[in-house]
Amino acid sequence: MMKRVNIFMDQVTLNSDLCCDALVIPKQALERCLREANESQIKIYLYLLENKKQSPTVSSIADYFNYSEQDVKRALRFWNTDNGQNKPTGSIQGGNVVEFSGRMPYSREKIAELMDKPDVQQLMFVAEQYMGRPIKPDEVTSILYIYDELGFAADLIDYLLEYCISNNKKSMRAIESVATAWREAGAVTLASAKKLTKSVPPETKEIMEALGFPADHQPVEAEIAYIRRWTKYYGFKMDIIGEACKRTVLATGKPSLRYANKILKEWHDNNVTGPEDIVRLDEEYHKKNMKEPKAAQSSSKAQTAGKGAGKFKNFNERQYDYDALMKEIISN
């Protein structure tokens, strides 16, 4: 889609050959975009509109923009001005994001039903002992989520809490992340979880230091899962991983396993096996970027030449019913 801005004296006009590929923004949301929203809030809202049928999560949005999950949640809270409905992550209703917790909230009846179970009551007591304080309502629902939705038995959750808190990971968000990583790795019993947590890749300390983590940082399973993926599944050696870590620090200025994972996943998808393959990909990237401006100039010259002809050749003009077209876009 080509656009051109014409400026004449104090008047500014935008010419566009926009066809039918459009993104409809509710008027109320557009006004907030123009008057109140900052850059990240606008970008995240447009991303949700574009991907609303895919139900993106807080984590996937953070990965896409290389934001922290807290940044994403703050942006979502900005749009969440009318949160009266229980809908999955990324739902949009009337111009507002109406739910972004990543899971469905529990009703009072469901909480009461689960809390009547003796093993759940014991879990709440154990959690308070580990935390050293009374647990908060949102922490209760997190434990219920791990118990009910992830299907962890009480003894496994007990070990999960002990493992995370002993590694100075006391937030329930971090504990949920570890639980999810265990489940994805097939560690759904106490024995399998203990076996998994003991299988720490020997390169872990070196990689964490290369990313800029403090020397006394104790990685939890969610972090180790990334390293295990790079070394076991991708099969990368330290020269490849170290280069990804260096680029991560240069690009973000902070330790980011997610950013490093994006780099390494792209290299894996492009069959990188050694440093020479990275050089090859870099050269291809630079060549592509050099060609694109030239292609844009050629396109501009072609359009200028076409105007002299008075009309396009070999192009059948179409008549669109734009009112019907916009209704169809909105309904989809």
Image: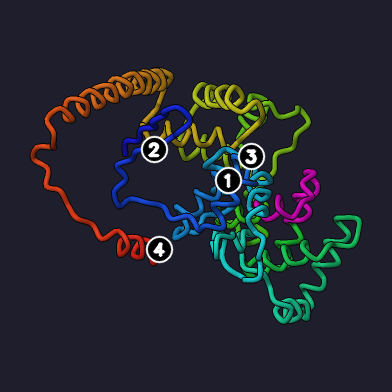
Q: Earlier in the sequence, mark 2 or mark 1?
A: 2
* Element type where label 4 sits in the image: helix
Q: What is the basis of the colouring in this image?
A: rainbow
**Quick one: 235 or 271, which is closer to the camera?**
271
Q: Which residues are magenta?
A: 160-177
From the viewer's side, name the closer residue of 127 and 286.
286
Question: Which kind of residue does numbered mark 1 sit on?
Answer: Leu
- Of the residues tagged 2 and 1, which is closer to the observer? 2
Observer-nearest residue: 187 or 143? Answer: 143
Q: Find residue 114 and report its horizontal and vertical position in percent.
A: 73, 77
Residue 330's label in the rendered image is 4
Of mark 4 and mark 2, the one earlier in the sequence is 2
Query: Which residue is labeled 2 in the image?
Result: 14
Q: CA distance from mark 3 to mark 1?
A: 49 Å
Mark 3 vs 4, N-terminal side: 3
Depth check, mark 3 against mark 4: the one in front is 4
Q: Which is more toward the observer, 328 or 90?
A: 328
Mark 2 is on which residue type? Leu
Report helix, strand or loop for mark 3.
loop
> In the image, 261: left or right of 286?
right
Q: Disc 3 designates what residue? A: 200
Q: Compared with residue 84, is residue 194 higher up or lower down, i.e. above or below? A: above
The quarter of the rendered structure image containing the C terminus is bottom left
| Residue 172 part of the magenta segment | yes
Q: Which mark is residue 85?
A: none
- The answer for how far apart the CA atoms under marks 4 and 2 are is 24 Å
